[in-house]
Image: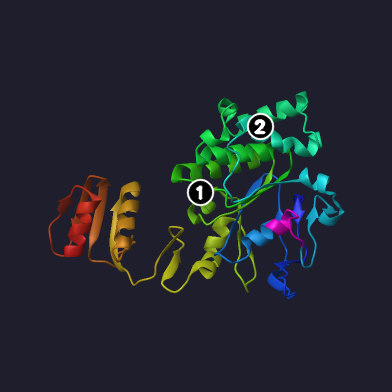
Amino acid sequence: MSPTPVIETPGLVIGYTPKSGKRTIIHDSLQLQLFAGEMTALLGLNGAGKSTLLRTLCGFQPALGGKIIIQGRLMTDYSQSELSRMIGVVLTEKTNAGGISVNELVALGRHPYTGFFGKLNSVDKQVVTESLKAVGMAEKATRFVSELSDGERQKAMIAKVLAQQCPIILLDEPTAYLDVTSRIETMSLLHRLSVEQEKAILLSTHDLDLAIQMSDNLWLMEKKRPMECGAPEDLILNGSFATFFNKEGITFDSSTGKLTADKTLSPIKVEGDPNTAYWVGNALIRNGFRPSSGIESNVRIHCYSPNQISLFFPGSIERKIGSIGELRKYIIEG
């Protein structure tokens, strides 16, 4: 039996109407589905309509056509209060709440339940505590938001959405202002929450590598082109990634999952320790060569370890090399 989507969009048309009165269509006839327990990443170049789609799905702006169905009901049938208990949103902008504590920030997520005066009862306080624990911020509950790092602020904002106790969470570029470690932590946290708390999580991102690694599903979005949806691995192997991201001078390499400069690469056979061979291949690609496992090259590299690499030129004896940096010099000069 197939799972029931928490959000589906039969025939959805999104866009905006400028003051001139002219309707501008970003995309048409979107047939999208989000499922509980899965994290979906929305990928596309700037201007593709990612933020417009997110704003439409959370009710911040109206659809231009079609329907948005949330757990079997039309979005338009929900009151604003009901909708706030169904969908939680984290926007791109940095949190500007330095004068309040982390606990107070997360408690704002209980607003759909506490009403105008915002008085927390014992249940509300327990939900706030559990939300902080879920993102690993319980020990920082009394800290001011202004004292947090960017990564910690993002965790606090995710805890605030968790405190809403909504089945759907939408995030607009949640890793935009974060360093490398914080980006990985945030994406890993979101995927874990989608599984452990049965949330349907949709986020937009420009971080191609992490989207491929961490997401259960990807939505590939580009103007004037049908949207592609599916598991990252399926979209890579069926050529969808290459179709969406190959541009003049740039090619998507399905063997590595990375975008690379488009140039004719000379093959060099690389073998041995897989980890060392991978990074040798990375250096080769950067310098105009293509790592190969076949016999199409007369040059061969055997990797024993990061500091024990052997280079073989045609008709020459083995040349032992102690680092990838040293290897690069030999290849270019050779």
Which residue sits furthest front? 99
In depth, the one of 31 and 84 nearer the eye is 84
Relative to 197, 75 lies left or right: right
Which residue is rendered at x = 56% and y = 25% of the image?
139
Answer whether residue 102 is magenta in the image.
no
Give the quadrant of the C terminus.
bottom left
Say how many tags the image has. Answer: 2
Residue beneath disc 1: 177
Bounds of the magenta segment: 55-62
The answer to whether residue 312 is seen in the rendering is no
Mark found first going from the N terminus, 2 or 1: 2
Which residue is rendered at x = 61% and y = 29% of the image?
133
Amino acid type assigned to the residue bearing label 1 in the image: Tyr
Instruction: Point out residue 70 in the picture as x, y percentages from the top left corner.
Output: 79, 52
Which residue is rendered at x = 26% and y = 66% of the image?
297
Q: Secondary structure at mark 1?
A: loop
